[in-house]
Image (cartoon, rainbow, N blue to C red):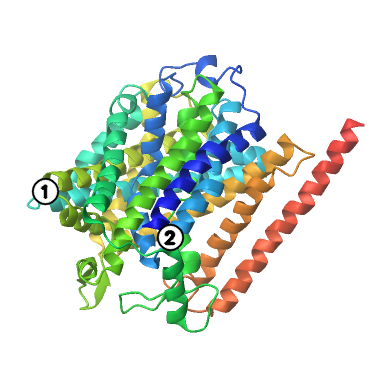
Amino acid sequence: MITFVIAVILLLLGYFVYSRLVERVLGVDGSRTTPAVAHPDGVDYVPMKPWRIFLIQFLNIAGVGPICGAIMGAQFGTASFLWIVFGCIFAGAVHDFISGFISIRQDGASLPEIHGTYLGNGMKQFMRGFTVLLMILVGAVFVNTPAVLLNQNFTPDWNIFIWVGIIFAYYLIATMLPIDKLIGRIYPVFGLLLLGMAVAIVVAFIVYRPELPEVWSDLSNQLNARGDGALFPLMQTRTHAPHTPLFPMMFISIACGAISGFHATQSPLMARCMVNEKQARPIFYGAMITEGVVALIWAAAATVFYHDPVLAAKTMTVNASGETVLLGGNAMVGVIASTWFPRVIAVICILGVISAAVTSGDTALRSARLIVADFMHVDQKPVGKRFLVALPVFVISAALLVFSLANPVGFDYIWRYFSWANQVLAMVTLWAITVFLVQHKPRSAWYLLTLLPALFMSMVTISFIFVAQKEGLGSFIPATYGYIIAGGITVFLWGLFVRWKAGYRKNTSLNNK
């Protein structure tokens, strides 16, 4: 439990200390006019109160990532705590803060437009399609999760497609309506529900006093289990599948609780509602830290179940092939809630997960509409034009959803590629804001704030391609070679950046003479 308490304290220190450093580097100016004040349109550019924007941002970025992702990451032991804490403070929260700040300064620009400004027009065109595809995947994933949970826990006799239809209808309404009519009114309530669910887990820690392993002893046990002192210890899975490497798989599994490219797609939605630049730090950096705390709580709860010999039996099931496998993140939420709480509180926990999924799904599709509208220059004030832009996005998302529900392994494939694409987007955004920092302060080294996370996430996402057994080339390439190839590509990217930076600073010096 000492590790857990220290981790929470570090996350809070990250907000109160490190975020202020980033704010000073950015030169946040409360006297500047924000997009919401400059040209409110009553649809997307709508001034709102900061506490309301914070809760909406928190719920938008949360989804099921800091719950299910953290639970999946906890299969690697307390190493997940380290990634949640340090990833959140130095990568995820900085990523969210700076991308949101840039959007404010660029008139509420969507994420691909920001990529284009700092990485070139070719990258902008590519990221437009890539980001819309990710938003569609998010929409499909976050219809599947609440539909399955609702059907399993409340209406087992219903056809699941009834819930799918209801959720999709809600998504369409939420996507079409002005942001303050539905999202602005009910999302703060859902945000409080999600926070209350995390508080309930903490109360369970106090009441049951479970034995939570400490990070130093847990990592030592993993290395001893390997017996070879490997740099990247392998998780001893409770399945009959091959062992899963901690790097990069844990960093892909835990996305929203540490760093997530999806977050930067949501930041422009809130950047168009702020009335003061000073709101950026508590809303963008603060919401990410809050999500990190939620992820840490759920990772700790799952770690208790995975390590306790009695509780561990509840984390496993037998699949159609007769193999004993670990339960998925959604199922583990029900196991944890039903084990520790009375039925009423357990239901509230499940509803919290459902609301988190639903509220991220609809804003993802809203973001897709805005991205498409931006690059097609379609005015979004007329409701008919909003519908025409949103319709093809919904059709594609629905097709993916039908595939995921009709195919026994369909959802698993969508989730894996969603997770990887999510981290690729975070990596590209980190490179974009690194270029921004170089241009923002040409003679300083503050670009290191995001260069180091950009290099790390490059290594994570590229390694996944060459190391992952099912999703990548891991079954064809030995892991050692996969890491070497990924490292070489990462170093190449670093070299390109160093070359560009030297040229930029030289040109800047010549222009100033």
Q: Is residue 494 above or below residue 354?
A: below
Q: Residue at x 59, y 58 (%)?
A: 456
37 or 351: nearer the eye?
A: 351
Where residue 10 appears, as percent x and y from the top left, is: 49, 47
User: Where the C terminus falls, by quadrant?
Assistant: top right
Q: Residue at x 36, y 46 (%)?
A: 294
Q: Kindly identify the amino acid type of the residue bearing the numbered disc 1.
A: Arg
Mark sitting earlier along the chain (1/2): 2
49 or 395: nearer the eye?
A: 49
Q: Kindly identify the amino acid type of the residue bearing the numbered disc 2.
A: Ser
Residue highlighted by disc 1? 343
Where residue 92 appears, as percent x and y from the top left, is: 51, 46
Q: Quadrant of residue 304?
A: bottom left
Where residue 328 appears, as percent x and y from the top left, is: 28, 62
Q: Is residue 375 above or below residue 300?
A: above
The secondary structure type at the circle numbered 2 is helix
User: Where the N terminus falls, by quadrant?
Assistant: bottom left
Mark 2 nearby-residue class (10 Å; few <14, some 14–19, many ≥20): many
The secondary structure type at the circle numbered 1 is helix
Q: Is residue 120 visible?
A: no
Farthest residue to the right: give it. Answer: 513
Residue highlighted by disc 2? 80
Q: Residue at x 24, y 66 (%)?
A: 315
Q: Is residue 158 visible?
A: yes
Q: Quadrant of residue 58?
A: top left
